[in-house]
Image: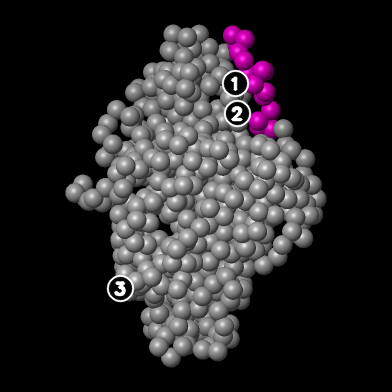
């Protein structure tokens, strides 16, 4: 896809319409028999057989209803009790960045400072000619107060700059050489949208929060187009292996410390290698205002073709709770339990946010908010309300991602405003980052408002789901496990349940990760197993509805299909 021209939509392979797929007795190309099938169709939630012709589902029913569509050339998948479901759709993910990090100094599989020391030293030794050591995936809880130091890195790599983004991608860890190259000193002021952590003498300690990441990140040589495209395809393979058939990329554009994924998608569309269906969320540059909207409109045209549609705009309204940059209605607490002078950062002034969202809504853009603290959630909902007041309930389907802290008064507003709650369920559990870096600084009442999935569901909110990979695992089944149990999959069975009243049932969680995300992605002919819909399907190795909820995360994906074409098969499928 040439970034300077508009790309015509490629009719293949999704060329069949629902009416053409309605079935006329001709043999199917692909048939699944001997289910169960979990359809996510409220009118018929369970079946045992599905037939596919071309890229569409032509029959859903019992074996006897579908077997007549098996012909000499039909591929038959005998489910033998394994569960067939609609493809998962990740409503908030960063595949290009994730794929790039897998090829860099990847710390995501480790959890301790000692492990990080070994991995960083080994990577630096294996790449002696690399001008920079980059990568990330380290956990805040591995260091006191979530604050690693430049000296730790200096002991491992004293002669080259090092910059490693943490697991949540809201902070970066730099060695002294990187800080020197960026010209950072005790006299350097904090940027408006970030913070330079400092030692006792006021010098940069090595940790850069939020917008301060860009002070070093802008110096790092950008990955080439070939490297970005390889990262996208590497990530696509991983996502397909977890049953993900479509996603919303939560950032197309350049942000502090992060690369623009757009050219990689354009190249993959041109090469015909983008097998997933992708909605792109164009990055809203918070240092600018409404003057960037014409540029976003032009990017929407350029980046819409094949299986890519850049029809959303991502607005990041705040940071994260662990580093106290998530925007809160009242101040964070200090270590002694007293009110601090910090309530987090609203990256865009609320009045301006309302204006920008109303203008974007007028242009038919969906707005995809990062809203983590209760003040950011309220400001985002206020902006949606302003757009609804101006234009009515247009089919722009705004959604708020993360929703860590939601004031109870704002929960009913999601349904009233038609704003989708986009949840990252894997975070809703007791773990060191929650118990040591979050709860003590929120206070008891506010800590009880975290990840209110049950309240949102009971209030009638539309729910979608995503992973935020590489911040956390891209495995939807692990996320479903936490949504249902409010415990981590690898935690002890004796671990306390995190806010048990906010648990949701498996059917609702699965619907969020399929039909709910399909709604957010404007992929209305996906998300459920129904006649006439696209054959985006996943075969699991078991039916998790039939087992104990504590074993949901043990479920594995055996096969993944997009438009009736197999894009992943496990070795034992």
Q: CA distance from mark 1 to mark 2?
A: 8 Å
Residue at 72 percent of width and 32 percent of height: 11
Does the magenta run of residues contain 70?
no
User: How far across and how far down the image is residue 567, in percent?
Assistant: 52, 37
The single residue placed furthest to the right in the displayed view is 5
User: How far across and how far down the image is residue 297, in percent?
Assistant: 76, 50
Most foreground residue, 330 or 566: 330
Q: Which residue is mark 2?
A: 525
Residue 285 is drawn in which quadrant?
Answer: bottom right
Q: Is residue 350 left or right of residue 305?
A: left
Q: Which residue is mark 1?
A: 532
- Is 80 above or below relative to 539? above
N-terminal-most mark, 3 or 2: 3
- Is 430 above or below relative to 500? below
Q: How is the image coloured?
A: one colour
Most foreground residue, 508 or 162: 508
Magenta-highlighted residues: 12-26
Q: Is residue 82 left or right of residue 90?
A: left
Residue at 30 percent of width and 49 percent of height: 498
């Amino acid at each position: 896809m040439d970034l300077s021209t508009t790309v015509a939509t490629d009719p293949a392979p999704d060329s069949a319409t629902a009416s053409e797929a309605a079935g006329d007795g001709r043999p199917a190309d692909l048939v699944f028999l001997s289910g169960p099938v979990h359809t996510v169709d409220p009118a018929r939630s369970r079946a045992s057989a599905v037939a596919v012709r071309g890229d569409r589902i032509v029959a859903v029913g019992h074996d006897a209803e579908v077997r007549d569509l098996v012909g000499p050339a039909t591929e038959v998948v005998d489910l033998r009790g394994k569960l067939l479901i609609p493809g998962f759709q990740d409503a908030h993910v960063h595949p290009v960045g994730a794929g790039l990090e897998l090829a860099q100094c990847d710390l995501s599989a480790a959890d301790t400072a000692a492990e990080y020391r070994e991995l960083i030293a080994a990577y630096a030794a294996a790449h002696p000619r690399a001008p920079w050591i980059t990568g990330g995936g380290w956990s805040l809880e591995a260091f006191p107060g979530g604050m690693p130091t430049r000296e730790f890195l200096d002991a491992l790599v004293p002669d080259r700059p090092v910059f490693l983004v943490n697991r949540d991608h809201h902070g970066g860890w730099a060695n002294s050489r990187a800080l020197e190259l960026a010209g950072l000193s005790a006299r350097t002021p904090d940027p408006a949208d970030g913070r330079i952590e400092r030692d006792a003498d006021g010098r940069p300690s090595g940790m850069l929060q939020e917008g301060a990441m860009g002070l070093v990140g802008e110096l790092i040589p950008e990955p080439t187009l070939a490297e970005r495209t390889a990262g996208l395809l590497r990530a696509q393979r991983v996502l397909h292996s977890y049953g993900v058939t479509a996603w919303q990329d939560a950032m197309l554009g350049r942000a502090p410390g992060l690369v623009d994924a757009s050219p990689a998608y354009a190249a993959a569309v041109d090469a015909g290698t983008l097998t997933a269906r992708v909605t792109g969320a164009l990055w809203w540059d918070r240092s600018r205002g409404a003057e960037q909207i014409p540029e976003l409109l032009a990017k929407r045209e350029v980046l819409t073709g094949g299986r890519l549609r850049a029809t959303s705009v991502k607005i990041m309204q705040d940071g994260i709770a662990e580093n106290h940059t998530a925007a809160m209605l009242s101040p964070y607490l200090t270590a002694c339990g007293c009110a601090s002078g910090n309530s987090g950062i609203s990256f865009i002034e609320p009045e301006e946010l309302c204006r920008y969202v109303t203008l974007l809504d007028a242009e038919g853009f969906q707005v995809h908010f990062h809203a983590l603290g209760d003040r950011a959630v309220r400001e985002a909902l206020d902006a949606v309300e302003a757009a609804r007041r101006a234009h009515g309930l247009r089919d722009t389907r705004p959604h708020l991602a993360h929703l860590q802290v939601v004031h109870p008064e704002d929960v009913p507003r999601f349904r009233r405003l038609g704003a989708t709650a986009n949840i990252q369920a894997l975070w809703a559990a007791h773990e060191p980052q929650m118990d040591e870096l979050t709860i003590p600084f929120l206070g008891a009442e506010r800590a009880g408002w975290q990840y209110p999935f049950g309240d949102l569901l009971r209030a009638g909110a539309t729910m979608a789901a995503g992973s935020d990979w590489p911040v956390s695992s891209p495995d939807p089944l692990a996320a479903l496990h936490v949504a249902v149990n409010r415990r981590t999959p690898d935690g002890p069975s004796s671990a306390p349940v995190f806010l048990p009243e906010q648990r949701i049932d498996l059917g609702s969680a699965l619907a969020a990760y399929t039909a709910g995300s399909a709604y957010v992605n404007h992929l209305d002919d996906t998300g459920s197993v129904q006649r006439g819909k696209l054959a985006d399907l996943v075969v699991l190795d078991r039916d998790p509805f039939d087992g104990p909820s504590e074993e949901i995360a043990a479920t594995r994906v055996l096969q993944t299909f997009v438009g009736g074409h197999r894009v992943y098969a496990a070795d034992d499928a």
